Amino acid sequence: MKKQPVIILIFLLLVIVGGYFFISRESSFNLDQQNLEARKTVEDYFIENMNASPEEAKEMAKDGVDLRVSENTTLMGIVGNLYAYGFIDNEDAFNNLLEKTPDTTPGREGAIRVGNNTVDIQTNYYLNYTMTDEQIADTLLNKGTFEENFKRYNYLFMPSGPGKGPGQRSER
């Protein structure tokens, strides 16, 4: 008969511990969701840094943007901004992807190293919100547009698409 209170005590302890882990996992999930939902967009960037109206910002971003990687940019800065502005959802996974994605272009002098791969500086990279993480990684490693006169714009993001932005692209 003395075993019954011990079994009940163990059962209650397991329920309490299990409940704690369930609640902490749920609250962690909710915090992650809140962080994802609280991030900014490039429209916010244009409003805050280029004094664009919300309507202008939406128009500026509708065809995608150029991410501008300057000589002072770090890999952490690139990945952090891609996350902060909603292009990627997981910084660690994206860093791994940058290391594993084939880099088919040689890096220019001063390029940012990512394992054996490189992201060129003084370069614009076209991005839009429909791109997958794999497409963004491939773009950063292989599809930049080098700009000789890079310092004429001091922005992280620039409007891109037909007739816009530093690259003056006509097609995507």
Image: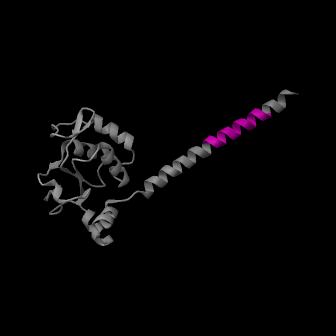
Q: Of all residues shown, which one is farthest toward the left?
A: 148
What percent of the width, then of the height, locates residue 99? 29, 35
Q: In percent of the image, x 30 and y 54: which residue is there?
A: 130
The foreground one among 114 and 86 is: 114
| Colour mapping used in the image | one colour
Residue 64 shows in the view: no
What percent of the width, then of the height, locates residue 71? 21, 47
Q: In percent of the image, x 31 and y 55: which residue is there?
A: 129
The picture quadrant where one finds residue 111 is top left
The picture quadrant where one finds residue 165 is bottom left
What percent of the width, then of the height, locates residue 58? 30, 67
The picture quadrant where one finds residue 11 is top right
Q: Which residues are magenta?
A: 8-21
The foreground one among 131 and 50 is: 50
Q: In percent of the image, x 23 and y 59: which residue is there?
A: 158
Work out whether 164 lies above or below 35.
Answer: below
The foreground one among 76 and 125 is: 76
**Which quadrant holds the N terminus?**
top right
Question: What's the magenta bit mostly, secondary-structure-wise?
Answer: helix
